[in-house]
Amino acid sequence: MSDRSTDETPASPASHSFIPALGADWLTPFYDAVAWLVGDRTIKRRLIEQARIAAGHDVLDLGCGTGTLSLLVKEACPGATMTGVDIDPKILGIARRKVESARVEVRLVEGSATEPPLPERSFDRILSTLVLHHLTTTQKRAALASARRLLRPGGEIHIADWGRPQNALMQIAALGFRLFDGGESTGANLRGELPDLLGEAGFRDVRETEHWMTPFGTLTFLRGAVGEHGRG
């Protein structure tokens, strides 16, 4: 096994505009510290358990950020093949250094979640944590449709993201990330529309599997599947 990451950049740079993970480039180096405060690793480990990744699976981390989820997948299932895609070259630089330090093989690709520069039907599992709430509803639809195309028959998508508040306390807690990311991006999440958007994208057996109360609002875990013959 290689002890280096494979770092890929599209032949032509992504034309999509994007907002850095913490809202500004200069904050990117602090991303992992902020993620730790949110309980990022606990969330990611639970999502990995839910995904039931097996040796030989090709796994995509959609919006991989600094590569934490990709590394946790390799830790939990070394026999899986891991790819991470993110639009932000600076955050991918952090991911590359972490992968090289861990001495595992992870393919890193620069590209948008709405149009990942990856072949159709090339993955068995797609995972995404705390990414979709950064996207407008139109971008969410595009990202989920792209994910559907990237999955093989029998494949699954597993998502952890902010969802509809369970109660008044969670409504108050969610105000922070709504103000930070804006109503256009967070609206579908807070209205509980992610399951419907997964269904629109062609996924079947869509379920919200868990809801966690957090200081930042309700965290919702979801899954969706592709039929064994490639039909939704």
Image: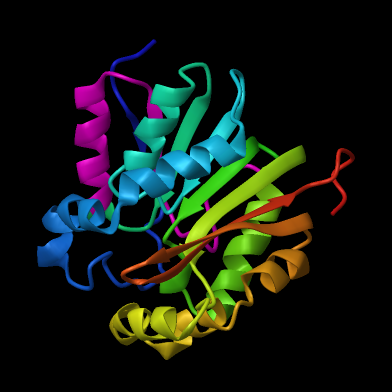
Q: Which quadrant: the C terminus?
A: bottom right
Residue 39: x and y in percent read 30, 52
Whether residue 108 sits left or right of residue 207 in the image: it is: left
Residue 103 covered by magenta stretch: yes
Point out the residue furthest to the top here. Answer: 1
Residue 101: x and y in percent read 19, 25
User: Which residue is more in the foreground, 117 or 57?
Assistant: 57
Do we see residue 43 in this rendering? Answer: yes
User: Which residue is more in the foreground, 230 or 186?
Assistant: 186
Residue 85: x and y in percent read 43, 47
| Above-or-below relation of 179 to 225 | below
Magenta region: which residues? 91-119
User: Which residue is more in the foreground, 160 or 212?
Assistant: 212
Whether residue 154 sits left or right of residue 69 in the image: it is: right
Residue 33 covered by magenta stretch: no
Do we see residue 9 in this rendering? Answer: no
Whether residue 154 sits left or right of residue 5 in the image: it is: right
Q: Which quadrant: the N terminus?
A: top left
Q: Quadrant of residue 210?
A: bottom right
Count of numbered circles on the image: 0
